[in-house]
Image: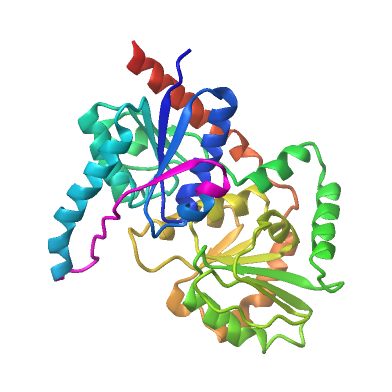
């Protein structure tokens, strides 16, 4: 069988890149002779994550679309044409484009359409982003992480969301463990992180770059809970200064071993990105979600199913203050205590389902 060229597009944030990497790894296990290329931009997290994963990365011009009517709108057609041209150069001779959303996908979809390259799209968010909505005009090979109620993605294959490697490995290794065993695993994670005996753990993060709004509230709160048996594990993000850690506050620019951090936590405070919602669900955690107040509004609905299950609360960023957190911390930790320690294994097959959809799309194109 000849070597095929498979191009993956999905950049900017870990929410787009991590699922793409999971699918790419599984694809290479089944098709080791194929060539895989990732499309990205110079400003995205893909410049770090993709090379670290051992895949080739080709960069195109990022199309910056202003969120308000400004003179910068006049620059969009020029940068879009350049980005499409660059994408066409990379996609020429490709057998398939697999897109996961983000700025890099729009020009990639347009380029693939003009070159007649088959397209597969996975949408992680409950409210599809504009790039994937554009791409859905050019293919019916659509997959979603969770059901979508309207538009072309309402008819998409529901695959779940591919999990990061450390969480997948953990779940696979303990797929038959009972609740008592999972309680022991979580206790071991606390010991591994040096958490004081008897302390509840609050895990806080705001995405790979961090959230100044969340960080500010946590900075004010940490000094006010020193008399409580609570330890905060805080990923402040690569774009922010890292505060000094102490016995009840552990700060990091970025948490590499998220599986251990999740296991140790009794409460998660985070943005409600699709990846985070999936990870919270998979590891059976309880979360307070602070949706990003800008964008397409997808974060406002990503956590709806977790709220319905009693595994999450959603709070607007403007209401997330130190006083609110102090007033509600104990009740949220109490709710967490009442939940089962058992994880959810539904997303373990997500990458395999997306690979199967992509293989089907390839076979259709080869007929």
Residue 217: in sight, yes or no? yes
The answer to whether residue 30 is magenta is no
How many tags in the picture?
Answer: 0
Q: Is residue 322 above or below residue 316?
A: below
- Where's residue 139, x and y in %? 29, 30
- Give the camera-side residue of 71 and 321: 71
- Give the camera-side residue of 165 and 75: 75
Q: Is residue 258 above or below residue 161?
A: below
Q: Quadrant of residue 338?
A: bottom right
The answer to whether residue 52 is magenta is yes
**Residue at 41% from the left image edge and 50% from the top image edge:** 11
**Residue at 77% from the left image edge and 88% from the top image edge:** 227
293 with respect to 340 (left or right) = left
- Where's residue 34, x and y in %? 49, 25
**Residue at 20% from the left image edge and 69% from the top image edge:** 68
- Where's residue 273, x and y in %? 48, 57
Chain part drawn in magenta = 50-70
Dominant secondary structure of the residues highlighted in magenta in the image? loop
Q: Locate the C terminus and report the quarter of the image it occupies.
A: top left
How are the colours assigned in the image? rainbow
**Residue at 42% from the left image edge and 30% from the top image edge:** 6
Residue 350: in sight, yes or no? no
- Where's residue 232, x and y in %? 69, 74
Q: Is residue 299 above or below residue 19?
A: below
Residue furthest to the top in view is 367
Q: Is residue 2 above or below residue 180?
A: above
Q: Quadrant of residue 242?
A: bottom right
Q: Quadrant of residue 78?
A: bottom left
């Amino acid at each position: 069988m000849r070597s095929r060229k498979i191009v993956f597009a999905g950049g900017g944030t870990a929410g787009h890149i991590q699922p793409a990497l999971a699918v790419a790894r599984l694809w290479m296990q089944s098709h080791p002779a194929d060539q895989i290329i990732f499309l990205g931009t110079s400003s995205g997290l893909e410049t770090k994550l993709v090379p670290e994963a051992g895949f080739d990365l080709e960069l195109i011009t990022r199309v910056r679309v202003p969120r308000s009517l400004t003179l910068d709108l006049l620059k969009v057609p020029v940068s879009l044409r350049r980005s499409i041209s660059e994408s066409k150069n990379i996609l020429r001779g490709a057998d398939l484009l697999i897109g996961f959303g983000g700025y890099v996908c729009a020009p990639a979809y347009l380029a693939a359409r003009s070159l007649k390259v088959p397209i597969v799209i996975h949408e992680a968010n409950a409210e599809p982003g504009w790039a994937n909505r554009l791409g859905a005009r050019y293919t019916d090979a659509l997959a979603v992480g969770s059901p979508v109620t309207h538009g072309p993605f309402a008819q998409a294959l529901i695959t779940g969301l591919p999990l990061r490697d450390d969480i997948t490995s953990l779940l696979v290794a303990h797929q038959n463990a009972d609740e008592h065993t999972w309680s022991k695993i979580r206790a071991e994670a606390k010991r591994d992180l040096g958490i004081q005996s008897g302390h509840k753990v609050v895990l806080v993060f705001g995405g790979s770059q961090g959230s100044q709004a969340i960080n500010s509230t946590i900075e004010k709160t940490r000094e006010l809970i020193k008399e409580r048996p609570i330890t905060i594990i805080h990923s402040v993000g690569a774009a922010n200064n890292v505060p000094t850690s102490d016995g009840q506050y552990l700060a990091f620019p970025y948490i590499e071993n998220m599986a251990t951090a999740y296991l140790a936590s009794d409460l998660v405070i985070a943005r409600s990105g699709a990846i985070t919602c999936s990870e919270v669900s998979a590891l059976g955690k309880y979360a307070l979600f602070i949706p990003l107040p800008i964008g397409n509004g997808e974060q406002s609905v990503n956590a709806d199913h977790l709220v319905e299950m009693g595994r999450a609360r959603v709070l607007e960023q403007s209401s997330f203050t130190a006083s609110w957190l102090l007033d509600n911390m104990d009740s949220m930790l109490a709710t967490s205590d009442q939940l089962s320690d058992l994880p959810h294994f539904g997303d373990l097959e997500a990458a395999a389902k997306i690979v199967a959809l992509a293989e089907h799309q390839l076979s259709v194109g080869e007929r």
